[in-house]
């Protein structure tokens, strides 16, 4: 070392035993390393790893990836695979998704070089399941990395039989289909998972199954069925017993169910608001980063569909900060979309529209079809705010086509209502006949779905059109019974607007 320092090839600082040496340049280090025989390098790596194990247990505990590296270079496959696994598990517990995916992938790669037996298959299943959950946080549900991990895990479950990882794997595989909006596949999986859970009743398995069925029904617009499943799931959830589910399923089950309930309570604004607050409070207590991201994403989107730019801006800003810190790609994209919409509604149309476009491109690039029609409606709304009504109609046409293609009918009524609204805003007095037809389609869809909030919005919009055409009695007869149905939420923008419209009709 003295010779290296004298030659100017290395530097040293500090005094023994804390002295630290470093090479002058990475290329010098590479040249020195490359000059060693392979067998010599392997022996040195092995000695380093063993000394670390014997003398520095704190390094073994806090830096398992360091030992994994040395055992890998030493050619000690089993030791290396074990330490990469430890490193991956440690990163996963800390919600460090980017590190976890890298470490777990290395462990899997090494274990698969060893002879196959049941123990090896069970270990790989454990790793693939964890890798899938880490990929969800890092890349998103629909990403190819996530799909590959859960597809391999599902193959292993089928070959091994009924194993503890069966439900986490089936859940993960369903989640991939859900975010890709492969509706038929997710419906088949939801039925299969519920049947399995009912065969051997267990509160956690039943909670998972009802959560899956509820979320599936939610996106296909079957809101009463969705609510029934989700309320069964929340009744089964026990925060004390199920507190570790965030690390098994990617999000805490209770937070996930409460977040979904916010979206199916269309007609119960106060209840939805309480469920949203419960979801966020529980997510913060759980302390799992991706769970908090999930709750913030749903809360931000709820602010947008509730026409509350302040709430949408607050939650999307919090989510953006979290997503950037934790490298949560999907949540960053979604938060960018909602933040852009809020920005447009706060008077910065061009900036907001550009942000929505950027976030939507990232969202779509991840393979996610889930929520894409809704995000397109936010883009259309921002365009209309800026006066570009023709582009707004074009974005809505794309959103409606996506609904028809994928079957995610939850936002269908609102898309048709917005189309009617934009048709009335076209230059030269708009196209009132087409607008009226769009509003009536929105009302019919909302009634089929029991989506009373969507129905109230559409009825208010059609009543306004009819009022402007002099059809006061028709407008009143349409809006009065819909408004009278509500028993809560009278301070929300939708009910205030409907009440103001009724006042003009008296």
Image: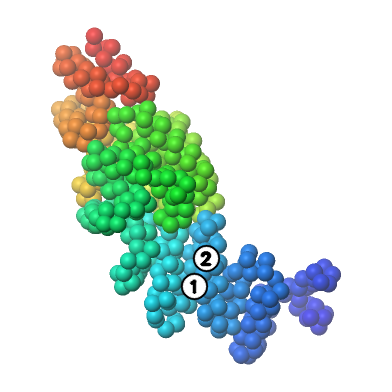
Marker disc for residue 460: none
Q: Would residue 166 appear left or right of 465 to someone viewing this image?
A: right
Q: How many marks?
A: 2
For label 2, the SS is helix
Give x and y (percent) for residue 146. 39, 62
Residue appearing at x 38%, y 48% in the figure: 360
Image quarter hosting the C terminus: top left
Residue appearing at x 55%, y 51% in the figure: 325
Give x and y (percent) for residue 67. 61, 74
Mark found first going from the N terminus, 1 or 2: 2
Q: CA distance from mark 1 to mark 2?
A: 8 Å
Give x and y (percent) for residue 254. 41, 45
Q: Are the residues at dot 1 and dot 2 in contact (C-beta closer than 8 Å)? A: yes
Vertical side of 162 occupied by 249: above or below = above
Q: Would residue 43 appear left or right of 254 to someone viewing this image?
A: right
Q: Quadrant of residue 165?
A: bottom left
Residue farthest along the top direction in this orientation: 506
Image quarter hosting the N terminus: bottom right
Label 2 sits on residue: 88
Q: Quadrant of residue 39?
A: bottom right
**Number of other residues with Cα within 10 Å of mark 2, as a class: few under 14, some 14 to 19, many 20 or more:** many
Marker disc for residue 107: 1
Tell me if I can see residue 365 in this picture. Answer: no
**Number of other residues with Cα within 10 Å of mark 1, as a class: few under 14, some 14 to 19, many 20 or more:** many
Q: Would residue 326 appear left or right of 480 to someone viewing this image?
A: right
For label 1, the SS is helix
């Amino acid at each position: 070392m003295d010779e290296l320092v004298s030659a100017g090839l290395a530097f040293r600082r500090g005094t023994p035993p804390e002295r630290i040496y470093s090479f002058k340049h990475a290329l010098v280090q590479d040249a020195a390393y490359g000059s060693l025989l392979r067998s010599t390098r392997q022996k040195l790596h092995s000695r380093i790893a063993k000394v670390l194990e014997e003398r520095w247990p704190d390094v073994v505990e806090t830096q398992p990836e360091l030992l994994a590296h040395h055992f890998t270079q030493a050619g000690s496959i089993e030791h290396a695979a074990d330490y990469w696994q430890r490193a991956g598990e440690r990163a996963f517990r800390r919600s460090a998704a980017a590190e976890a995916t890298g470490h777990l992938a290395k462990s899997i790669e090494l274990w698969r070089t060893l002879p196959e037996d049941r123990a090896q298959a069970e270990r790989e299943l454990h790793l693939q399941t964890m890798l899938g959950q880490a990929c969800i946080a890092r890349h998103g549900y629909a990403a190819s990395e996530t799909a590959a991990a859960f597809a391999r895990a599902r193959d292993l479950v089928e070959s091994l039989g009924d194993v503890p990882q069966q439900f986490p794997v089936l859940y993960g595989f369903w989640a991939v289909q859900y975010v890709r909006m492969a509706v038929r596949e997710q419906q088949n999986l939801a039925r299969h998972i519920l049947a399995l859970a009912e065969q051997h009743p267990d509160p956690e398995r039943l909670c998972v199954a009802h959560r899956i069925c509820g979320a599936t029904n939610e996106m296909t617009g079957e809101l009463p069925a969705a609510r029934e499943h989700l309320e069964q799931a929340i009744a089964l959830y026990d925060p004390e017993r199920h507190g570790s589910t965030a690390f098994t399923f990617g999000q805490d089950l209770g937070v996930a169910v409460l977040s979904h309930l916010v979206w199916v309570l269309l007609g119960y604004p106060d209840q939805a608001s309480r469920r949203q607050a419960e979801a966020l409070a529980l997510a913060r207590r759980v302390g799992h980063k991706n769970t908090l991201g999930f709750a913030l994403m749903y809360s931000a989107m709820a602010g947008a569909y509730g026409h509350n730019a302040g709430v949408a801006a607050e939650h999307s800003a919090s989510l953006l900060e979290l997503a950037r810190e934790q490298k949560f790609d999907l949540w960053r994209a979604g938060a960018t979309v909602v933040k852009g919409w809020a920005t447009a509604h706060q008077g910065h149309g061009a900036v907001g529209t550009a942000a929505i476009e950027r976030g939507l491109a990232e969202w779509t690039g991840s393979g996610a079809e889930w929520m894409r029609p809704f995000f397109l409606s936010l883009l259309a709304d921002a365009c209309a705010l800026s006066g570009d009504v023709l582009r707004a109609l074009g974005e809505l046409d794309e959103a409606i086509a996506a609904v028809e293609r994928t079957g995610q009918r939850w936002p269908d009524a609102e898309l048709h209502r917005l189309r009617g609204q934009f048709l009335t805003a076209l230059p030269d007095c708009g196209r009132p006949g087409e607008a009226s037809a769009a509003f009536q389609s929105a009302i019919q869809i909302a009634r089929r779905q029991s989506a009373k909030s969507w129905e109230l919005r559409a009825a208010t919009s059609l009543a306004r059109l009819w009022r402007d055409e002099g059809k006061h009695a028709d407008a009143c007869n349409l809006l009065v019974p819909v408004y009278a149905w509500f028993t809560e939420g009278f301070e929300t923008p939708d009910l205030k607007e409907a009440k103001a419209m009724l006042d003009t009709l008296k």
